[in-house]
Every structure is written in structure tokens, then in C-alpha cells.
Image (cartoon, rainbow, N blue to C red):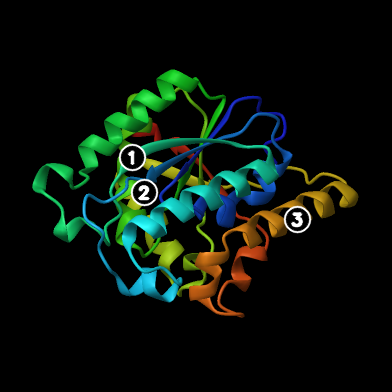
């Protein structure tokens, strides 16, 4: 898949999305880096329903544990973390206006990450369903359009991609903004290598114990289905 890419940069909205959507590809890449957007610790120790379902008593405990889980999960796959430090939307309503993430701010941070790491390929989320995912996708498109020479691919986020019609709607949205999306179907590695990557991905997914607790025993099966990618290119009239 992306094993021939020495400098692979994967954009992840939250601390698990890259592994859920791209874990097998990360396991096969030589020096992958995961750039996660929403990694900030909230100023106040808020209490949200999602954190409670994950077994946490407050936001600070939750984010501290998630960052540690993510470091260990990426370590399983041989990937390096890179945190942008924006605030997750579940904590934003109680934050000051200046602390709330904006599309422009995220886009500039992603441009800076691209310039710093000089990737041979960029993987961005398609931005399916979740407001944080949509915001990161839009900002990632803005960033890539400023650096269009970098080969770019979209990945379907695990869990959300199974929602009826949601991927098709994203394809229409991309075309409307002048970006063509084509299924990316490279030759697959040998069966033994695919089994190795799948096993590593399963191991990495299990590290996100707090998140899996909230999904329930059968709530995250989709992340183990084959990963799907789209080649993104500027439409002819945008070049």
C-alpha cells in the first residue's frame, strides 16, 4: 500500500482515528508519522458523557490517558506521533473564544507540518459524519491546495464509513470544490505480510482500551474491515 513511501504523513482528527482507518498501512510503511489535531488538555476539568462512558471522571484524566494510549498504539505500528494541540469539540463550548479551533488555524498548522516533515505522501480523513472530522477534512483540503505537489490520498474513517451514503456525499463535495477522488487500489503484498500487518493493527487497536469500552464489544468491528483509500487530484479546470 504505502510501504514504498519513506515519509508518510497521516492526518488524524482524534487520538485513534489514524489507527482505526490506516493501521495496516502504518504497519507497512517505513517511517510513518501521525499528525493528530485534537490533543489539547482543556483548561477546566470538564465532565462529558463520552468521557464518562470511557470510564473517566473528568476531561484532564481522559485526555492524559488517551495521549498515553495513542503513543503506545503508534509504537506498536512503528509510527511517530505529532500533536497539533487543538481542543476537542466536546470541550470547546466551555472554552474561551480564542481557545476554540478554527478551520484557518488548523489549516495553517497542517501547512506548517507539511513544510516541516516534507512528506512523500499525505493521507487525510474524508471527514465523515463527526463535526471534528469534517472540520479537519476541510482544513486539510485547504492546506493541501496550498501544497498541491504533495501526493495526497483520502482515507475512510473506521466506524463512520459504514453509514449509508456518507462516502458518496463526500465524493460529491470534493468534486464541487475541484478535487477528483479515484479509488486507490495498489497491488497487495503477500498474504503473510498482510496477516502481519493486520495482526499489528489489531494489537494497536486494543491499546485504545478506554475508547473501546464506550463502543461496546461489537461496536468497533468495522475498523478491522479492509482499509479504503482514494487518490485525490486537482480537477483539470483547477490546474
Q: Is residue 224 visible?
A: yes
Tag in front: 3 or 1: 1
Q: From the viewer's side, name the closer residue of 191 and 96.
A: 96
At which x and y percent is residue 225? 67, 65
At which x and y percent is residue 18? 53, 49
Residue in view at x 31 percent, y 45 percent:
138
Q: Is residue 127 visible?
A: no
Report, in whole angstroms, how far the alpha carbon at label 3 lies from the one at label 2. 30 Å
In the displayed structure, would residue 206 be above or below residue 178?
A: below
Quadrant where the C terminus sits is: top left
Residue in view at x 69 percent, y 35 percent:
29
Residue in view at x 78 percent, y 46 percent:
188
Query: Is residue 149 left or right of 196 when viewed as pictured?
Result: left
Q: Which residue is mark 1?
A: 85
Is tag 1's residue or tag 2's residue first in the polypeptide sequence? 1
Q: Disc count in the image?
A: 3
Q: Quadrant of residue 236 in the image? A: top left
Q: Which residue is mark 3?
A: 198
Circle 3 SS class: helix
Circle 1 SS class: strand
Q: Which residue is mark 2?
A: 174
CB contact under 8 Å: marks 3 and 1: no
Tag in front: 3 or 2: 3
At which x and y percent is residue 86? 30, 43
Amino acid at each position: 500500500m504505502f510501504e514504498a513511501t519513506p515519509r508518510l504523513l497521516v492526518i488524524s482528527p482524534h487520538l485513534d482515528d489514524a489507527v482505526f482507518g490506516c493501521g495496516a498501512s502504518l504497519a507497512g510503511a517505513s517511517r510513518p508519522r501521525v499528525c493528530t489535531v485534537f490533543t489539547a488538555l482543556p483548561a477546566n476539568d470538564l465532565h462529558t458523557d463520552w468521557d464518562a462512558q470511557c470510564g473517566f471522571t473528568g476531561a484532564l484524566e481522559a485526555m492524559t490517558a488517551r495521549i498515553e494510549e495513542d503513543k503506545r498504539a503508534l509504537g506498536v505500528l512503528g509510527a511517530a506521533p505529532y500533536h497539533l494541540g487543538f481542543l476537542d469539540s466536546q470541550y470547546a463550548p466551555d472554552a474561551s473564544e480564542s481557545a476554540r479551533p478554527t478551520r484557518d488555524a488548523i489549516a495553517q498548522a497542517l501547512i506548517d507540518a507539511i513544510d516541516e516533515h516534507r512528506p512523500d505522501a499525505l493521507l487525510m480523513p474524508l471527514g465523515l459524519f463527526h463535526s471534528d472530522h469534517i472540520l479537519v477534512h476541510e482544513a486539510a483540503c485547504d492546506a493541501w491546495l496550498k501544497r498541491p505537489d504533495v501526493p495526497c490520498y483520502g482515507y475512510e474513517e473506521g466506524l463512520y464509513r459504514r453509514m449509508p451514503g456518507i462516502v458518496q456525499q463526500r465524493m460529491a463535495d470534493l468534486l464541487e470544490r475541484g478535487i477528483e477522488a479515484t479509488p486507490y487500489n495498489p497491488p497487495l503484498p503477500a498474504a503473510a505480510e498482510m496477516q502481519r500487518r493486520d495482526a499489528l493493527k489489531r494489537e494497536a487497536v486494543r491499546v485504545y482500551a478506554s475508547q473501546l469500552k464506550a463502543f461496546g464489544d461489537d461496536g468497533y468491528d468495522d475498523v478491522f474491515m479492509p482499509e479504503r483509500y482514494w487518490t485525490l487530484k486537482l480537477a483539470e479546470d483547477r490546474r
